Amino acid sequence: MNLLRELPKIDKFIKSKKFEGLNLNLISKIAKQKIENLREKILNKEIVSFSIEEIEDDVKNSYEKLFEPSLIPLINATGVILHTNMGRSLIDKELLNRASKVITNYSNLEYNLKVGCRGERYEHVTNHLKNLLGVEDVLVVNNNASAVFLILNTFAKGKEAVVSRGELVEIGGSFRIPEVMAQSGAILREVGATNKTKKSDYKNAINENTAMLMKVHKSNFSIEGFSEETSYKEIKALCSEFDLLDYYDLGSGYIPELPYNLGANEPSLKDILKDDPSLISFSGDKLFGSVQAGIIAGKSKLIEKLKKNQLLRMLRVDKITLSILEETIKSYLREDFKSIPTLWLLFQSIEDLEARAKKIAQEIGKDKCEVIKTQTFMGGGTLPSRKFPSVGLHIKGKAVKLEREFRKNGLIGRIEEDKFLIDFRSILPEVDGRIVEIIEEILV
């Protein structure tokens, strides 16, 4: 019981020189918990001695750990370029540096320099996107789910939106199209079967309460075999006939022609925009390769109505998103795809990937690893079931143990056929040196 009397008083304890310059409120909170834990151990006879210096060190260490970053950089060696769990699209450093000039200063975010009064934040990307896409107008919100919600709430609240049963998708985090529609106030009208939806199904569903015909891209699954779907062109023709709104939720949109024949069943923005859609929406951080955002494009009169919806203020993007998105769009307009890492990684040739893998293999030693041909997926709710070639470095040893050890060192690989692989499809060359260091540390 004498040990209990030796426990320090909080008010005196936090005056230690070790805590000078630190947040004493936090120090006090941590100290109270540490001393209480110590009290319980004494009562349970788990310890027979302690020192004030040890408690001080323990409290200070816990304090410092509070300020260690939770978000840390990782090496994505899974081969999945748009890995949702690791942040999807990468942002080019030079592109970010250009955007940072605005982000780190006051700016004309909502200030019209010509007339000296309040301006509109969306105009900073509007003209660039209009030039890139060839549409009448655009609007940017914080993600594509927000875009879907805003469009449905604006044009189909209390009315029916007709959607194919085969397109009622669920995206990551259990967000489902039917639930998003319900929250928006729109009434879902399902048509067709899971595997087949014909033009006549849409036509037969149209009634006096129908507001729009909506097509949803199957972003993370595919239907094979005995199946049929109605093209967007056919849906638009029906909308013109019955004076309804046509809307295509693309999920992910891309500009340049994709390599490895990946665009065979994945229409590009250019292809879709040929049909002159009333409204489309897509994500900024998927195949477009920029920041998280929902990009809405289409007819100016419809975009104006979206801007007048009071919900827009809750869904709008900030200066950081707009600045980086603007720089990305300018890279597209310059056809500078090297500034868009998502595309750069996707377009890398097998020969280039193999050369990098072989160089690392030579440094490590062929007795410890081998270069192999493999296949991967794009990820991020894009190009479902579409494999394309890649190159991996097989690190020899027990795959499960190696995966764990590499993960501890910030490199996330994958296990394939009981082999631990470092897949170069999702790795930028600038981290190749660090990969060598990690391998050498683990295979000592």
Image (spheres, helix red, strand yellow):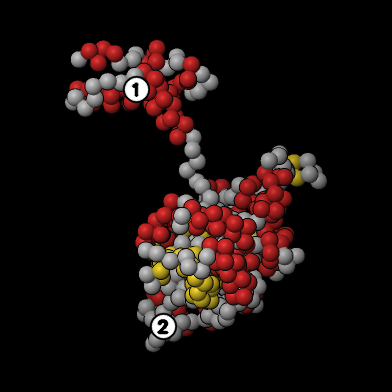
Q: Is residue 207 visible?
A: no
Residue at the extreme right of the image, as rendered: 114
Q: Which residue occupies 38% across, 72% down?
A: 417
Q: Is residue 302 left or right of residue 223?
A: right
Q: Which residue occupies 71% across, 62% down?
A: 331
> At label 1, which amino acid type do we have?
Lys
Q: Quadrant of residue 401?
A: bottom left
Considering only order in the chain, which callout, 1 or 2, is on the residue closer to the N terminus?
Answer: 1
Quote the CA–CA distance across marks 2 and 1: 61 Å
Nearest the viewer among 100 and 394 is 394
Residue 200: x, y in percent?
Answer: 44, 84
- The residue tagged 1 is 32
Q: Is residue 252 left or right of residue 157?
A: right
Q: Is residue 344 left or right of residue 409?
A: right
- The residue tagged 2 is 224
Q: Secondary structure at mark 1?
A: helix
Q: Which residue occupies 75% across, 41% down?
A: 117
Residue 327: x, y in percent?
Answer: 70, 56
Q: Secondary structure at mark 2?
A: loop
Residue 160: x, y in percent?
Answer: 43, 67
Q: Residues within 10 Å of mark 2 (few under 14, many from 20)?
A: few
Nearest the viewer among 214 and 104 is 104
> At label 2, which amino acid type do we have?
Glu
In the figure, 202 relative to 338: above or below?
below
In the figure, 440 relative to 366: above or below?
above
